[in-house]
Amino acid sequence: MTKESLVDPGTGRKFYLDYPADLTETEPVTLVLSLHGAGSFAAWQRLYFPAFDCAGSHRLVIATPTAATAQPVRRWLPEADDDHLVNVVEMVAARFGPARIASFWIAGHSQGGLTANRLVSVPYFADRVDGYLSLSGGRLGPAGHVDGFGPPPAPGEPPRPRPQFSPPVLPAADLSFIFAVGEYEIVGLPEASPWAERYGAASRVRLPDVIDTEPGQVWDKYREGRSSPSWGLLPAPGVAQVYVYTGAAQGRVIADVVRLEKGHTEGLEPGITRALVQMMVDAPGGKLRSLSPGVARR
């Protein structure tokens, strides 16, 4: 695997780019734009969702940028970040060639997932993105958070009430959608999916559990020792339940993944990372390379 740090000349901002070291000049790739959550940054996101470990086996190209706005907490904002994210996609498409990008996914953790949901309704991304992976970043359909969810209060602060998040807006774009979440974050996983219903999929089917004997690579070190199970504790081996909605129109992949005994911030284990990446590369693609030959413009 090759890791580079590139500079977007339009904004002067850096981003990471991971891709197979033995990538040939003609073979197709799956492009992943990976977005961190609020209060985080690109280096942490790379380890939270370590898709780069699958770059060689699954022929991935992964771009991982950092949001510009740092106060009061680093987070993605349309006016500060959308042009940079477009530039990142343009640079990667130009580097590898739009015709070689077999599929284009946005993966986002927490507020990065909510940002991904917003981006796939922005025309530039709606025309190009084939799939959206929400990593504890909101489900296309209800999945309410437990009481006290959120960054643990500082000593002496009162407990947090259950947050009242509005369900993410269902985008108009055609997309595959995978939702992955920690068991301790949500009240429960609904059996139905509005996104699956849109594509006429059958009832969900549970696949064999993914059993990981190794832990993830990162956690919320800032709150270590005072965190909560819903926010996340130390990384540990784990088991993930995988549900798929079969028979969706256009072959779209629609899935829910629940990581048992996990919260919001424990990094993904290697086995479930591979399982998510496999679903991504198995999903239909081609939107970006279906544009005019050699063109990846706004």
Image (spheres, grey):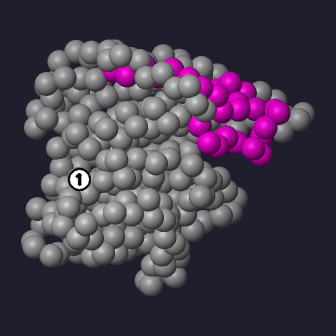
Quarter placement of the C terminus: bottom left
User: Is 51 left or right of 160, judged from the image as shown?
Assistant: left
Q: Amino acid at mark 1?
A: Ser
Q: Where is residue 158, by image quadrant?
A: top right
Residue under the point 40% across and 37% down: 274
Residue 193 makes an appearance in the image:
yes
Chain part drawn in magenta: 216-243
Is 173 contained in the magenta span?
no
Residue 78 makes an appearance in the image:
no
Query: Which one is in front, 175 or 282?
Result: 282
User: Is 207 left or right of 134, judged from the image as shown?
Assistant: left
**Tag 1's secondary structure?**
strand
User: Is 103 left or right of 57, judged from the image as shown?
Assistant: left
Residue 238: x %, y % from top left: 56, 23
User: Is 91 situated above or below 104?
Assistant: below
User: Is 135 situated above or below 106?
Assistant: above
Q: Where is residue 82, by image quadrant?
A: bottom left
Residue under the point 36% across and 16% down: 208
User: Is 35 situated above or below 3?
Assistant: above
Q: Where is residue 139, by image quadrant?
A: top left
**Which residue sits furthest bottom?**
9
Residue 12: x %, y % from top left: 52, 82
Residue under the point 10% across and 37% down: 250
Name the residue tied to disc 1. 103
